[in-house]
Image: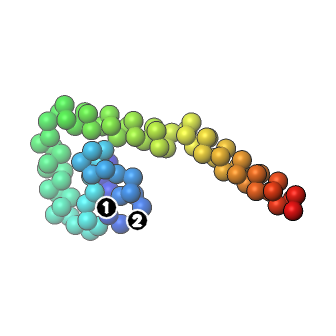
């Protein structure tokens, strides 16, 4: 994944590990990066893709989203129970 350093997307990327971050609006940097990616060793690129996929599944997969949503609901319900006892 290629993202710019604008907004929150760059917080999800370890540049060079599971994607790349370029300065916003920098077409020259993008062109250089695309050339660099094209020249990458195919095995290194495959490993990077695998790392990115594993990270995405861990951080944004359905199972994790369900668990995180359940934690939020549990916390809300716990706070409501505490507040109703006061």
Identify which residue, 78 or 62, lies in the foreground: 78
Look at mark 1 in the image and give the residue it sits on.
4
Q: Is 34 situated above or below 6? A: above
**CA–CA distance in space, label 2 to label 1:** 8 Å
Quarter of the view holding residue 49: top left
Element at label 2: loop
Outermost residue, left side: 39
Q: From the viewer's perspective, tell me whether residue 76 is left or right of residue 54.
A: right
Q: Position of residue 60 (x, y in %)?
A: 49, 44
Element at label 1: strand
Q: Which mark is residue 7?
A: 2
Outermost residue, bottom side: 25
Outermost residue, top side: 43
Q: From the viewer's perspective, tell me whether residue 49 is left or right of residue 56.
A: left
Q: Is 10 situated above or below 45? A: below
Bin the neighbour count of mark 1 within 10 Å (Cα to Cα): few under 14, some 14-19, many 20 and up. some
- Residue at 82% x, 61% y is 83
Q: Position of residue 56 (x, y in %)?
A: 42, 41
Identify which residue, 31 or 15, lies in the foreground: 15
**Color style of the picture:** rainbow
Q: Contact (CB < 8 A) between labels 2 and 1?
A: yes
- Residue at 76% x, 56% y is 79
Q: Quadrant of the C terminus?
A: bottom right
Q: Position of residue 33 (x, y in %)?
A: 18, 53
Quarter of the view holding residue 54: top left
- Residue at 71% x, 47% y is 74
């Amino acid at each position: 994944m290629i993202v710019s350093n604008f907004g929150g997307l760059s917080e999800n990327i370890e540049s060079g590990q599971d994607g790349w971050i370029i300065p916003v609006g920098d077409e020259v940097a993008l062109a250089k990066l695309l050339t660099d990616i094209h020249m990458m060793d195919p095995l290194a690129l495959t490993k990077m893709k695998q790392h990115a996929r594993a990270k995405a599944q861990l951080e944004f997969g359905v199972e994790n989203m369900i668990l995180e949503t359940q934690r939020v609901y549990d916390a809300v319900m716990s706070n409501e129970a505490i507040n109703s006892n006061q």
